[in-house]
Image (cartoon, rainbow, N blue to C red):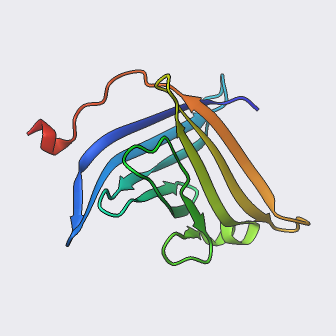
Amino acid sequence: MLFTQRSRVQPIDAQTDGPQLYYGLRSHTCIVEPDDVETFQDQVGYWLWEPATGPLLQTLAIPRGQIAMAIGRASPDAKTFEPSAQRTSLMNGICSNPFLEYAFETTEYRIRITINVDGTWSYEQDTILLVHGGPEPFHHTDRNTLRKIREQSPNPTARA
């Protein structure tokens, strides 16, 4: 299937919690089938990175009633990183509404991001689902390469 994807990321102010300092981006991704008005996937969340120790977090929520927090690591010069979330983890977990939990239990989520030399960025994503009545886990995979269409405005502190 072919889809049209628009991902918008916007810098946010640094986030502190005691000695912890995260830099981040607010993210909104909308995916539709070409020539279709109905949204196929809508997702909001944050990308957060702590330079002192290197953890990279992706938080995400979809309006069908599911949230996840994926955790990985990234150095300041990283061109590839891969956060993941597992259903049973309290630190990088997945939580779903009762229907999704019953019919499409999500057991794992993984996204590999690559920053390309031409200024684009690519991702490969694998979400593993246990579909009710299905014989084995189902791998819902997605990949895309995105390009910047305009510069972002600075985060609120930088504007001040």
Q: Considering the image in quadrants, where does the C terminus appear?
A: top left
Query: In the rendered image of this protein, does residue 39 appear above or below residue 126?
Result: above
Is 130 located above or below residue 48 in the figure? below
Measuring 42% from the left and 21% from the top, which residue is drawn there? 149
Residue farthest along the right direction in this orientation: 135
Residue visible at 68% across and 52% down in the picture: 126
Residue 110 is drawn in which quadrant?
Answer: bottom right
Identity of the residue drawn at 33% across and 39% down: 10
Count the marks. 0
Q: Nearer the viewer, residue 64 or 50?
A: 50
Q: Position of residue 102 (x, y in %)?
A: 73, 72
Q: Is residue 88 above or below residue 100?
A: below
The residue depicted at 72 percent of the width and 47 percent of the height is 141
160 relative position to 154: left or right:
left
Image coords of residue 88 (percent x, y): 61, 77
Q: Is residue 100 above or below residue 24?
A: below
Q: As rendered, which of 132 and 137 lies closer to the eye?
A: 137
Outermost residue, left side: 160
Query: Is 139 on the left-hand or right-hand side of 15?
Result: right
Q: Could you tell me which quadrant the N terminus lies in?
A: top right
Q: Position of residue 11 (x, y in %)?
A: 29, 42
